[in-house]
Structures are given as structure tokens and as C-alpha cells.
């Protein structure tokens, strides 16, 4: 791990400059986040949550704050949606979901940094009762500290596709999803940063009564890419489907930490994260299901599947349960292994060469998740991102 001389005075000056020009709620959040950042140590390979990460050659030095620029593309007929630069909508930070400090599952220091130093950012608010048929697109174009807030009003329904492909070498981002009563959201994020980038993303969702959220986190970019993905089911009847796909090659490292937080009765969550790993790439997954004492009749499931495409690839998986209620249904499972020989034989018996057969199996491995997301246009865009990588599958 490399940490060049960090000018704490300069970072503090950046945060204070941003706080001084902001309304009271935003200024307080920035100062509190900076205090948390300064109080926390940089992680090492012996830190909790980082013991499976190889930090050799990874530069964790934070860059100065610069505006994070995103382009928000609305479908036709969506003129009632309120969107634009987050700094232009400071009133959103008076919401309880955004006023409180949230440190993340493993990215405590880096999430705090993102919340202290963001500039610009993006904001999307779908008003109550509105249904948006086609996807809203959010594309990040520049900036080391991307900050996005999405609010789906009561009874509204939308699909949002967020893309990270800008060439910043260091990224620490934060996204908040707020679903009001009865809201519905399909949310996909593609992390396709350049191969030498270090990427930290903290994604947090709060769901009200009878709200439903379907998320898909798809990662192919970065040298080291870590994400905390948290869903808090706060209202009775809230539902969450959490999907994830990773394709790794060379010496890429991916580390995902997920939380399924059942805080109210009659809530449901279902998680399926998959990784296909080639060369000497590495994926680590840590998932926790928490069912509070008052969250009776909750239903939670968690599955992590890892496909090793070469002898040098590695996957680690750690599911965890914290259950305080007694009337619940909660299960989990995990697998790590190479391409199944019987599947390979079956596909080859249909006349395909071994390398082509392996690509067919990997394609099918991903397809289950894409079909569960149930948004064909987004699935097609994600297939286009991974297809060039699949041409190498089977070489081993």
C-alpha cells in the first residue's frame, strides 16, 4: 500500500470552504463527515474487513476535491421529474435518511471522505404517483467524489441506470436511495472505471412501507474496487432484491460487503451475487442479514456464487446472520468452484469446441442475474460490456 504525504490541512481547508458556502444542513453534514474521516486510520491488510485485500502497489492517497460532473438523461414524457446538480437542492439534506451520518460497512474512512468533499453531484426526484416507463440514465463524466441522491415519491415507479466510466484514478463515491411508501425502483449501476483506478462506492437505500427495490451492481473495472451495498427495510411490507455481477481478469480485486437490514415486520429480501474470475483476479464477498427483534415474519435469503476460470483466480465468501426475532425465515448459501465438467461435456456434445463451450457456460452463469433484473434494455447494455472479455474465456 502506498500513502504519499497527505496534506491534512489542505483537505480540511477544502471541506471548510465547501461547508462555508453551503446551507446549514449540508455544512453540518460535511463537517461531521470530515471529523469522522480524520478520526479513522487508513486501513491495512490486518484491519477488519480488509484482511483479504492485497494492498501492495495500491495508492490510497486522497486527491483534492474537484466537482463531480454527471449527465442525467430523462426519457420523453418525464418532464415532471426534478433532477440536476445536487448542490442546487440542499433541501434534500433535511430528510432524516440523509441528515444522519452513515459510515458504511467497510468503507468507513472513504465513505466519510466522499460525504465531506463532494462537489456538484447529482439529484433525481420522481414525484409521488408518477410512473416512468423508460430508464433514467445517470452518467458520471469526471470527479473523484461522485455523490448521488435518488428519491422516489410515494406510489411512484421508475428505473435508473447509473454508469461509472470516467478516467479518475481514485474514486470515493456515495449514493443514497430513498423510497417512500409504496414506491417501486429498479436501479442498476455499472462500474467500468479504467483498469488502474482505485474505486470505493458506498450505496445505501431506505425503504418505507410497502416499497420495493431491485438493485443490480455490475463491476468489470478498476484495479481495486470495493463497494458497500446496504438496504434498510424500515417499513412493514418493504421488499428488496439485491443482484450483483462481477467479471475479473488479470490481477483485478473486487470486494463487496452487503447488508440486508430487516427493521420492520413482514419484510422480504433476496440476494444473489455472482462472480466469474479469470487469470489471477480475486473477489471477496461478505454479506450480513440482520433481522431486528421487532421484524417478525420477515423472509430473507442470501446466495453468493463464484466461478473460477483459471487456476490462479480466487474467491472468498463470508455470509453472516444476526437474528433477534423468532418468527422468521432466513437462509443463505455460497459456492466457489471451476466450470462444471459435466456441464462442459454436455455443451461440447452439441458440437462446440471446449473454449466456446466454456464461454457459453459463463454467459449462462451471468444470464440468470440479468433475467432476474427484468429490464431488457439495461441487460443488453451490460452484456455488451462483458462480451469482449468473454472472448478470452476458455484459454485456460
Image: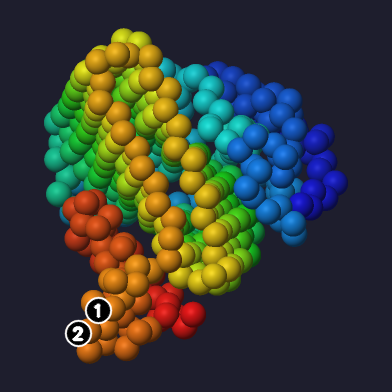
Q: Is residue 100 above or below residue 131?
A: above
**Within-10-Å neighbours for mark 2: few <14, some 14–19, many 20+:** few
Residue shown at 49% from the left, 40% from the top: 318
| Quadrant of the rendered image containing residue 109 | top right
> Which residue ends up furthest to the right in the rendered image?
5
Q: Is residue 234 above or below residue 308?
A: above
Q: Is residue 332 left or right of residue 314?
A: left
Residue 347: assigned label: 1
Residue 12: assigned label: none
> Which residue ends up furthest to the top in the rendered image?
294
**Within-10-Å neighbours for mark 1: few <14, some 14–19, many 20+:** some
Q: Is residue 216 left or right of residue 93?
A: left
Asked if the residues shown at circle 1 and circle 2 are in contact, with their CB atoms under 8 angstroms apart, the answer is: yes
Describe the element under mark 1 as helix, strand or loop: helix
Q: Which residue is mark 2?
A: 350
Q: List x then y, in percent, for residue 276.
A: 43, 63
Could one spot residue 374 in this view of the protein?
yes
Q: List x then y, in percent, for residue 310.
A: 51, 72
Q: List x then y, in percent, for residue 365.
A: 31, 63
Which coloring applies here? Answer: rainbow
Could one spot residue 359 in this view of the protein?
no
User: Of 248 and 343, which appears nearest the observer?
Assistant: 343
Residue shown at 71% from the left, 52% from the top: 55
Amino acid at each position: 500500500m502506498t500513502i504519499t504525504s497527505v496534506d491534512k490541512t489542505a483537505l480540511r481547508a477544502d471541506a471548510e470552504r465547501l461547508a462555508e458556502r453551503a446551507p446549514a444542513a449540508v455544512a453540518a453534514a460535511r463537517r461531521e463527515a470530515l471529523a469522522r474521516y480524520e478520526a479513522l486510520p487508513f486501513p491495512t491488510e490486518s484491519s477488519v474487513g480488509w484482511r483479504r485485500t492485497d494492498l501492495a502497489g495500491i495508492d490510497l492517497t486522497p486527491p483534492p476535491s474537484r466537482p463531480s460532473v454527471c449527465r442525467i438523461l430523462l426519457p420523453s414524457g418525464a418532464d415532471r421529474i426534478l433532477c440536476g446538480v445536487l448542490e442546487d437542492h440542499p433541501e434534500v439534506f433535511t430528510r432524516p435518511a440523509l441528515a444522519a451520518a452513515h459510515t458504511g460497512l467497510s468503507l468507513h474512512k472513504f465513505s466519510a471522505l466522499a460525504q465531506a468533499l463532494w462537489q456538484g453531484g447529482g439529484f433525481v426526484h420522481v414525484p409521488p404517483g408518477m410512473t416512468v416507463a423508460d430508464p433514467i440514465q445517470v452518467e458520471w463524466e469526471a470527479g473523484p467524489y461522485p455523490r448521488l441522491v435518488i428519491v422516489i415519491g410515494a406510489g411512484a415507479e421508475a428505473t435508473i441506470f447509473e454508469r461509472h466510466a470516467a478516467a479518475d484514478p481514485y474514486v470515493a463515491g456515495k449514493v443514497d436511495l430513498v423510497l417512500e411508501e409504496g414506491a417501486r425502483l429498479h436501479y442498476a449501476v455499472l462500474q467500468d472505471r479504467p483498469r488502474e483506478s482505485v474505486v470505493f462506492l458506498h450505496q445505501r437505500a431506505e425503504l418505507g412501507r410497502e416499497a420495493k427495490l431491485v438493485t443490480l451492481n455490475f463491476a468489470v473495472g478498476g484495479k481495486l474496487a470495493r463497494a458497500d451495498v446496504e438496504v434498510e427495510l424500515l417499513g412493514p411490507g418493504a421488499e428488496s432484491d439485491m443482484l450483483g455481477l462481477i467479471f475479473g481478469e488479470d490481477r483485478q480485486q473486487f470486494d463487496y460487503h452487503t447488508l440486508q437490514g430487516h427493521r420492520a415486520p413482514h419484510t422480504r429480501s433476496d440476494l444473489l451475487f455472482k462472480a466469474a474470475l479469470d487469470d489471477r483476479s480475486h473477489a471477496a464477498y461478505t454479506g450480513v442479514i440482520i433481522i431486528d427483534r421487532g421484524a417478525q415474519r420477515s423472509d430473507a435469503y442470501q446466495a453468493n456464487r463464484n466461478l473460477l476460470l483459471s487456476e490462479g483466480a480466487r474467491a472468498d465468501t463470508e455470509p453472516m446472520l444476526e437474528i433477534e426475532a423468532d418468527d422468521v425465515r432466513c437462509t443463505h448459501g455460497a459456492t466457489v468452484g471451476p466450470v462444471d465438467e459435466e456441464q462442459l461435456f454436455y455443451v461440447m456434445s452439441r458440437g462446440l469446441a471446449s473454449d466456446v463451450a466454456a464461454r457459453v457456460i459463463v454467459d449462462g452463469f451471468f444470464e440468470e442475474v440479468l433475467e432476474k433484473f427484468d429490464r431488457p434494455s439495461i441487460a443488453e447494455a451490460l452484456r455488451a460490456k462483458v462480451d469482449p472479455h468473454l472472448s478470452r474465456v476458455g484459454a485456460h
